Image: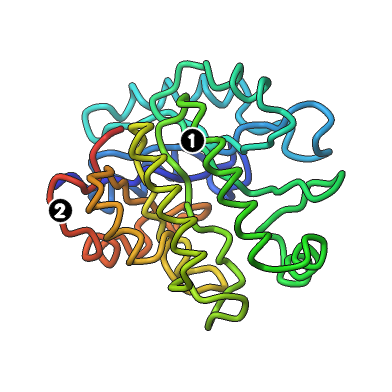
Amino acid sequence: MIKGNYHTHTTGSDGNVSPEAMIKKAIREGFKEYAITDHYFFPKGFRNWGNDFCSEEHFRKLKLLKKKYSSKIKILIGSEFDWLKDYKQWILNEAKRDLDIKIISVHFLKLGDEYYPVDHSDELFDEMISNVRSIKNLVRQYYKELRNAIKTRVFDVVGHMDLIKIWNKDNKYFSDNEKWYVKEVIRTLKEIKKSGMSLDINTAGWRNPCNEIYPSSWIIAEAERLNIPCLISTDAHRLKEVGYKVNEAKKLIKSKNRCTTTP
């Protein structure tokens, strides 16, 4: 079984550690494969921050580091793209970039004329629910947009599939065994299966307010039943997160051929 980490961030976007420092830490922790997947920059006019993410200089340095440490670790050069429905064509054009791994995630939902970040705060999350009149409507919109992203067939990995639960500690908003919720998840997993993509098994959920891995353990089990490849990640932004609860995540993945294989 290969020890790998397939979703991480550095100073190439919103992380606080340089790519080389992170690579050295990964080597010390015994990783054999390590993907640096900084957030891709936003389309012009979307936000007034993040526009310097994943610069050409960042990718140039990663190529040098990949070669420099090739005898000790396999470095994958990648990026995490944000799905923004109004910018679909821009995203698809940018995703043509030659990368080892491309993650697609939904961090923003468009409600009315404005995009709202799902993971900003519970107060803003409550405002989002009010805008669409119910948590059920919000969750359904989230999974609908995620499926739309998956259907493009240009990405390799679905990032933190159930991020929408980030503020749902102790089932504050919904229970993930409710029929309507299970239906949304299963529809999404089937779309992942059809696309040939992998599923991000993301330990950052254990650091987030929900205090639960992304996706939930029953979703991981269902993904395995569908024979969807699973890639363990820590979504590291700091050195201490490089190996965060990787062993705990491995215990949730039963199929030997599903764990940490390069997409």
Q: Is residue 83 above or below residue 162?
A: above
Specify whether 41 is left or right of 225. Answer: right
- Disc on the earlier residue, 2 or 1: 1
- Label 2 Cα crowd, 10 Å radius (few <14 / some 14-19 / many 20+): some
Residue 240 visible in the snapshot: no
At a point 22% along the width and 53% down the height, the residue shown is 225
* Image quarter hosting the C terminus: top left
Disc 1 marks a residue whose amino acid type is Ile
Asked if the residues shown at circle 2 and circle 1 are in contact, with their CB atoms under 8 angstroms apart, the answer is no
Q: Which one is in front, 240 or 218?
A: 218
At a point 39% along the width and 37% down the height, the residue shown is 35
- Label 1 Cα crowd, 10 Å radius (few <14 / some 14-19 / many 20+): many
Helix, strand or loop at label 2? It is loop
Mark on residue 150?
A: 1
- Residue 110: % across, % down: 76, 46
Residue found at the very far right of the displayed protein: 113
Residue bearing the label numbered 2: 255
Total number of numbered discs in the rendering:
2
